[in-house]
Image (cartoon, rainbow, N blue to C red):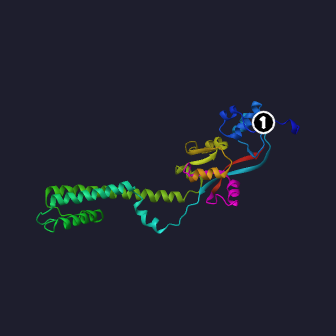
Amino acid sequence: MPLDTIRVRGELSNASHRAHVSSYTACVYDIGLGNIDLCLGDFWGTPDRYALGVASFVQIDDEAIRLVVPLRNNEESFWDLAVKPFRQFSLHLWGMLAGIIIVVSFAMIIFEYGQSEGDFENSGVATDMLNSMYLAMSSMYSGICFKPVTVSGRLVALGYGTFIVIVFASFTAETASYVIMKQMEKTIDSLEAALRNGNSICFSTGMSLMAETKYDRFAKLGVEIDSFYFSEYASAMDTGLCDFALVANRLLTDECERGESCNFKIVGGPVLSFPVGY
């Protein structure tokens, strides 16, 4: 075909964009509609583009698609180490626990103050209030420290003890879950492991058919991005749109050689392979 007869269009037709999310597939579709003569670029020869049956494909290479994950910063500051034991509960929950300790302290003073052989017999209101706070806080770590003598005081102590058991059971469960999730996060070394773990995966719209056919959970966990630039996938992972991404190996390599997006790494072997051409 003479070069001066090739029609050049800066934008694809609206009909192609409505029919296909991927701009690359939409370009092939535009050939079928007769709007353009060819799509020039490093296209993937995907099954859905072949299925259109409207254009020939000249293969020049094969491109492997691999899983990319963010590099984790394992260095923890003193502050990180100091607050780590408290991360299992939210700030609001810790505030509620502090409030309950204060309420129990006041309740024990009200019911037990001035009682013979009790904790708050005759030391003065201020001293007994501080002592009640101390006993309530100590009870969280070593069991009920109060020695109530009234029926009301014993009921408060019994309810407080039950509450402490529930808190410790919940804290233990949350700690175990936190440790397990951290361990699973460290052992993600393949797409199969990521899908089993329920991690979301960003991927190019052009690979959706092959990926969803090969991996059962991909249709649920996959997040489509119509872009051929790794910076778009890096941004998606940084903002939490997805946990990991499927990209061509050279995209990350080229990006890092420019001094950008070097805080990501490729794990596992190729998960998909596409012929590349024009």
Spot occupied by residue 190 in the image (x, y as percentages of width and height): 59, 54
Q: Is residue 20 visible?
A: yes
Q: Is residue 53 visible?
A: no
**Residue farthest to the left, as pictured:** 116
Residue 204 against residue 151 in the figure, above or below: above
Q: Is residue 111 left or right of residue 226?
A: left
Spot occupied by residue 20 in the image (x, y as percentages of width and height): 66, 36
Residue carrying label 1: 55
- The part of the image, by quadrant, that contains residue 89 is bottom left
Front-most of residues 60 and 213: 60
Please tell me how crowded label 1 is: few (under 14), some (14-19), or many (20+) other residues with Cα within 10 Å. Answer: some
Q: Based on the picture, tell me whether residue 13 belongs to the magenta stretch.
A: no
| Number of callouts | 1
Which span is picked out in magenta?
239-266
**Residue farthest to the front, as pictured:** 126
Front-most of residues 217 and 163: 163
- Residue in the picture at 74% in, 49% down: 62
Instruction: Name the quarter where the N terminus is drawn.
Output: top right
